[in-house]
Image: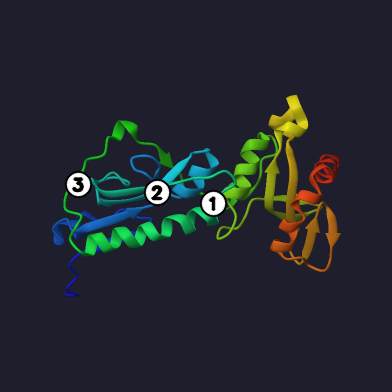
Amino acid sequence: EREIEALLCIGWHYLVPESVVKRLEGRVYVAHDSLLPKLRGFAPLPTALLTGQDRTGVTFLRVGEGVDDGDILWQQDVPIQDGDTIGDLIERITPLYRDGTTKLLRGELQDSTPQNSADATYSIWRDEFDYVIDWNESAVLIERAVRALGPPYLGARTRWRDKTMVILAARWQPETFGQFASHFALASLIAFLPATGLSAFILDRGGRSPDSLRATLTLCDRILLTSFAMAL
């Protein structure tokens, strides 16, 4: 009775009921932020950064019976560059949603291609526990986590003197630490405590902004790693 002709699902976390698909005669579409069949499921952009992939993109597809497994209507990729954060990727793919939606509304997305499920990979749901840094991981994975879990997400975090500390930026510098690089080459780490700025583990009660903290990144390379190792 609402005279709905079609549905386009973006950021939708549930399977569309089969009754809805039948009522709309299959005119139910999904826009997904990965290059399907790679990274079906939740949070594919953070997963792309966490797993070190070099490309991502947006796929428009018909809704299928399973999770993001429908026929592909349109797909466009963009590069993932060294040092990209989750915010960078969101900004880079946003125009692709506009382009795909425009093509869909103009009736230009008629031909479809079935996905090869043998090539499928999956991205899992992430919750508050996934923001906590595991310091047993390699420096490479920790640095990726900092970039993947930042704004608009809550940020990679750890505990410091019984308080939650959010890591704003990190830099991996293997050339500084030679054979120990895989575990100890987090040569720069910028973080903040709620209501308190923290730079190079020197408390700054003036409450520095994230931008001013990042500006100090190159100044505290060696001091910071030494301080952090001593703290652990």
Which residue is label 3 attached to?
Answer: 112
Which residue is label 1 attached to?
Answer: 127
Of tags 2 and 1, which is closer to the observer? 2
Measured as percent of width and height from the top left, residue 196 is found at 79, 64
Going by the picture, which residue comes out furthest to the bottom? 2
Choose between 87 and 165: the one closer to the eye. Answer: 87
Choose between 87 and 14: the one closer to the eye. Answer: 87
Report crowding for label 3: few under 14, some 14 to 19, many 20 or more residues within 10 A (C-alpha): some
Q: Where, quadrant-wise, is the C terminus in this rendering?
A: top right
Report crowding for label 1: few under 14, some 14 to 19, many 20 or more residues within 10 A (C-alpha): few
* Image quadrant assignment for residue 98: bottom left
Q: Is residue 146 above or below residue 205?
A: above
Q: Are marks 2 and 1 in contact (CB under 8 Å)?
A: no
Which label's residue is closer to the chain start, 2 or 1? 2
Which residue is label 2 attached to?
Answer: 57
Query: At x 60% / y 46%, what residue is drawn?
Result: 83
* Label 3 SS: loop
* Cα distance in 3D space between marks 2 and 1: 23 Å
Measured as percent of width and height from the top left, residue 153 is found at 56, 58
Which color scheme did the rendering employ for the protein?
Answer: rainbow
Circle 2: residue type: Gly
* Cα distance in 3D space between marks 3 and 1: 34 Å
Circle 1: residue type: Asp
Which label's residue is closer to the chain start, 3 or 2? 2
* Label 2 SS: strand
Which label's residue is closer to the chain start, 3 or 1? 3
Query: At x 58% / y 53%, what residue is drawn?
Result: 128
Query: At x 68% / y 36%, what residue is drawn?
Result: 139
